[in-house]
Image: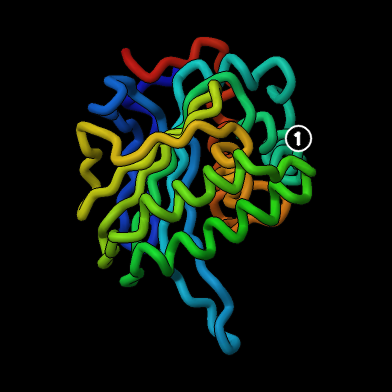
Amino acid sequence: MSTASSITGVTVELVEFPAVLTSPATTKSYFLGGAGVRGLDIDGEFVKFTGIGVYLEEKAIASLIPKWKGKTPAQLKESLDFYRDIIKGPFEKVIRSIKVRTLSGPEYVRKVSENCIAHIKSDGLYGDEEEKAIQELREAFKDQNFPPGSTAFYRQSPNGTLGLSFSKDETIPEHEHTVIHNKPVSEAVLETMIGEIPVSPALKESLATRLYEFMKNDNFKIGN
């Protein structure tokens, strides 16, 4: 049985992503599905901006096993459907984005929102409600500043809500800063990270490798 003692953490650019995360905002515990760096090629140099960890509810493994158990890590990594089943699965995800270089809130959210809009439009789902939700997303980050080590948390719920919270370290705030009620926008945030055009290929690979190991066991548990 996989338990909290056998679910390992991951270090990304000296940032520690613990094996299990407990949120005071929801009182739930989530296990680390995978983690990786996000960066951009600037003038021929790969510049690292954030480390991203994706945490999942325990029931995520039971949800994924029927379709994906037995596939190799390489097969999982190459399957867009696998990542879509994570994004759209009937379980909560908490995305922990830790900054490794200073970013202002507007600077950070500009690229996030642009990527989300592009994806939603490609699915033919971008309308007035989505535009309003994107504005709420931008507004939430407007007055934020992220020095190295600070964190933005996204809680993606299967009912279509996106909870946002911010911290100057790895601590999860007791209360969420903003909750956005729009399923396409909620799903697009994670889609842009691990979907068809991912901002973090390293995160995708980590998810495939780790979830392959977790799906070997039908009795996966976070606790003992």
The image position of residue 9, as x and y in percent, is: 36, 41
Residue lying furthest bottom in this view? 43
The quadrant in which the N terminus is found is top left
Rendered position, 61 above or below 190: above
The image position of residue 31, as x and y in percent, is: 40, 29
Would you identify the image quadrant in which residue 68 lies?
A: top right
Q: Work out whether residue 217 can be spotted.
A: yes
Q: Residue at x 69, y 35 (%)?
A: 84
The image position of residue 17, as x and y in percent, is: 34, 45
Choose between 217 and 46: the one closer to the eye: 46
Choose between 13 and 100: the one closer to the eye: 100
Q: Residue at x 45, y 19 (%)?
A: 58
Would you identify the image quadrant in which residue 154 lies?
A: top left
- Residue type (three-letter) at the residue carrying disc 1: Asp
How many dots with numbers? 1
**What residue is disc 1 on?**
81
Rendered position, 8 above or below 60: below
Rendered position, 10 above or below 214: below
Q: Does dot 1 land on a helix, a strand or a loop?
A: helix
Q: Work out whether residue 204 can be spotted.
A: no
The quadrant in which the C terminus is found is top left
Q: Which residue is drawn at 33% across and 31% down?
A: 20
The image position of residue 98, as x and y in percent, is: 35, 55
Q: Which residue is drawn at 56% across and 43% down?
A: 190
Would you identify the image quadrant in which residue 127 lies?
A: top right
